[in-house]
Image (tube, helix red, strand yellow):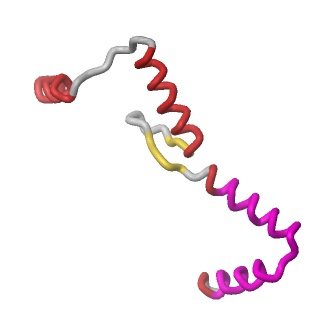
Amino acid sequence: MNIEAKRDELIQWILNVNEDILSKVSAIKEKTVSDEIVAYSTKGESFTKKQYVKHINDIRESVKNGAKTYTTEEVREYVLNSKRV
């Protein structure tokens, strides 16, 4: 069965299921969406939405606590003047 036919079949089935089954389908959808990769770190680590929000909040907290930050110009200078390996 091709994907379009399978989608149509599932749509028709979902339209006619009871509330209990619909709640289970909704839970599956939410779990699938919450586990979806939404971003990658500069080191290649993958993040789900929940992990990414935590990562950004951790960075904000670090900056608030005095972590060193760099201006665009400082980054540009570093990149342009660093020796290539």
In the image, is 74 to the left or to the right of 22? Answer: left
Magenta stretch, main secondary structure class: helix
Q: Residue at x 65, y 81 (%)?
A: 7
Task: Say above or below: 25 vs 62.
Answer: below
Whole-percent x and y of residue 77? 13, 25
Tell me the quadrant of the picture where the N terminus can be found: bottom right
* Residue 6 appears in the rendering: yes
Magenta residue check for 21? yes
Tell me the quadrant of the picture where the C terminus can be found: top left
Q: Residue at x 67, y 83 (%)?
A: 6
In the image, is 73 to the left or to the right of 56? Answer: left
In the rendered image, which quarter is residue 15 located in? bottom right
Task: Say above or below: 84 vs 21.
Answer: above
* Residue 84 appears in the rendering: no
Magenta residue check for 41? no
Count of numbered circles in the view: 0
In the rendered image, which quarter is residue 74 located in? top left
In the image, is 69 to the left or to the right of 37? Answer: left
Whole-percent x and y of residue 79? 17, 28
Whole-percent x and y of residue 19? 86, 70
In the image, is 26 to the left or to the right of 77? Answer: right
Whole-percent x and y of residue 11? 70, 81
In the rendered image, which quarter is residue 24 located in? bottom right
* Residue sitting nearer the eye, 29 or 46: 29
Q: In the image, which residues are magenta?
A: 5-32
* Residue sitting nearer the eye, 1 or 27: 27
Task: Say above or below: 9 vs 60.
Answer: below
User: Farthest residue in the top direction?
Assistant: 66
Q: Residue at x 45, y 25 (%)?
A: 60
